[in-house]
Image: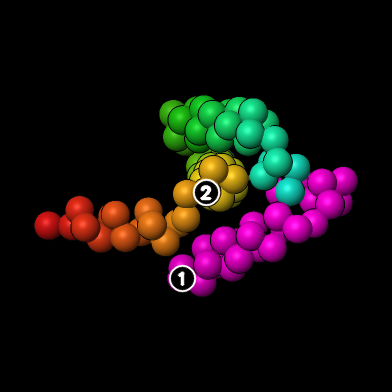
Amino acid sequence: MFKNLEELIKTIRERKNSSPERSYTNKLLNDENLSESKVKEEIGELFKAVEENSNKIHEATDVIYHLMVYLESNNIKIEDVMEELKKRQK
């Protein structure tokens, strides 16, 4: 189930070395303002989708993708986030 998430993270990391003209992910990784605005935009769209009970999965997927790119572009490793979540389990 989480293999897709692992593959997404792997792809994001690989795209760091690609051309911004050929890779939307690379463009996001190299433009902090764009990446931040996309996270905010996609979260807003998810809230609206939940409120309207439509396209929730699509919008949630967009949020996860853009959040993963944002984290990676700011040197926040998902592995560290997962470790912090593990510490918080009670």
Q: Residue furthest right?
A: 21
Q: Is residue 71 left or right of residue 15?
A: left
Quarter-of-image position of residue 73: top right
With respect to residue 12, does 7 lie above or below? Answer: below
- Residue located beneath label 2 in the image: 75
- Magenta stretch, main secondary structure class: helix
Q: Is residue 29 left or right of residue 52?
A: right
Image position, residue 23 (x, y; %): 79, 51
Looking at the image, which is closer to me, 16 or 51? Answer: 16
Element class at badge 1 = loop
Quarter that holds the C terminus: bottom left
Looking at the image, which is closer to me, 5 or 28? Answer: 28
Q: Is residue 90 magenta?
A: no
User: Residue at 63% across / 60% down in the picture?
Assistant: 13
With respect to residue 41, does 11 lie above or below? Answer: below
Q: Is residue 2 magenta?
A: yes
Q: Earlier in the sequence, mark 1 or mark 2?
A: 1
Residue type for callout 1: Met
User: Residue at 46% across / 70% down in the picture?
Assistant: 1
Image position, residue 67 (x, y; %): 53, 44
Element class at badge 2 = loop
Numbered range of the magenta stretch: 1-25
Image position, residue 37 (x, y; %): 61, 28
State the scheme by which the image is colored: rainbow
